[in-house]
Image (spheres, rainbow, N blue to C red):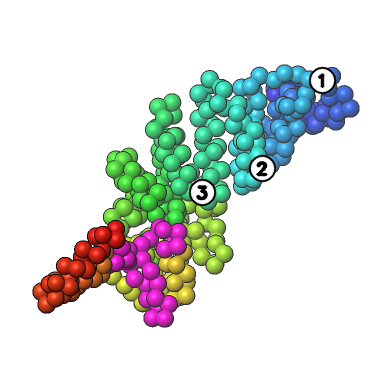
Amino acid sequence: MLSSLPRNESKHIANYALAKIQPRNISFEDQVTAFRQLLAEIYECEGDCKQAANILSGIPLETSQKQYQNDFKLKTYIKIAELFLNEGDSAQAEINLSRAATLEKDSKDQSLQIKYRAAQARIWDFKRKFVEAASKYYELSLNSRLDETEKNHALNNALNCTVLAPAGKQRSRLLATLFKDERCQKLPAFSILEKMYLERIIRTDQVKEFEAILQPHQKATTADGSTLLDRAVIEHNLLAVSKLYNNIRFDELGNLFDISAQKAEKIASQMISEERMNGYIDQIGSIVHFGVTQCLPTWNKQMQNLCTQVNFVIEKIQQNEPEWSRVALATQINSN
């Protein structure tokens, strides 16, 4: 009945009813739930997703005397998480989605399972876990229950998160997967995907074109003042340079990437320490050397040379002092 009234009247009546029922909520749990669902819809339509989420959070899903069905609780927790995400509050979204985790495993409702996975991908996206987010988005883009528009949206999110992900083996696998997916060729960011997959250096003008299609939270800055995209592109370019050079000075690297030599050294050092790039740093010469230092093969070669020299000495002794060599050999055998 309330839903048929004008929005402002419905909101006023529902808020008034909740205030009056408050002292006896336990006796009117069904009515409280209905009022809160209606108010949440109204606040969402008005663009106040935070208030809508808080209203829905007031439904006592776990503490009431009423036994709510698991799918109802799952649907409500997912909706609350989605509303908080719309407001950019990934922390509260994660809290509510974690409550839905066990419910999702027992649910047979595939549409709710899809919404749960989509919300999980968005949370990882907000928390800058771009590898995990990209994988989940790509998984959703292959789901046959989604229409083409939803699939393309998920695929586009997967591509954006892959570009923003830290350079390394995991991102390389995602780049290969997306590059080989023919659907990506129609996406606006395919050109930067292609350059990353082919390990080509990305220029500043190409970065700005891609940045224009990112979501607001993906344009956040890091501790050193650079954006997430700037950081990802610098790391990618470092890997690309490592395929072209055996070594390079940090001042030259900084000029190439339009950053300071100190920043270039810091990023290279972090990538090497995290085993996302092979190489080592000569701090005295301010040079980064790319590739793996072949310590074991070098040691083996030195040991081989040493053994060869020892054999050569033994052969000379046997030639010049055969009797002494025979006695020494017999003594060694008897001692063993």
Stretch of the chain drawn in magenta:
271-299
Q: Amino acid at mark 3?
A: Lys
Considering depth in this image, is 22 or 302 the residue closer to the camera?
302
Q: Which mark is residue 92?
A: 2
Say which amino acid is labelled 2. Gln
Residue carrying label 3: 129
Residue at 32% across / 66% down in the picture?
295
Residue 289 located within the stretch drawn in magenta:
yes
Q: How many marks?
A: 3
| Mark toward the viewer: 2 or 3 | 3
The disc, 2 or 1, on the residue closer to the chain's N-terminal end is: 1
Quadrant the C terminus occupies: bottom left
Question: Label 3 crowding class (10 Å Cα cut-off): few <14, some 14-19, many 20+?
Answer: some
In front of the other: 63 or 201: 63
Instruction: Sort mark 1 into few (<14), some (14-19) or many (20+) by Cα contacts within 10 Å.
Output: few
Instruction: Check the image and report above or below for 200 versus 133.
Output: below
SS state under label 1: helix
In front: mark 2 or mark 1?
2
> Does the magenta portion include 243?
no
Provide residue 273's location: percent of width, then percent of height.
Answer: 45, 62
Tell me residue 29's x, y (percent): 79, 21
Amino acid type, label 1: Phe
Q: Position of residue 318 (x, y in %)?
A: 13, 72
> Where is mark 1, residue-wise?
28
Residue shown at 55%/58% (left/top)?
220
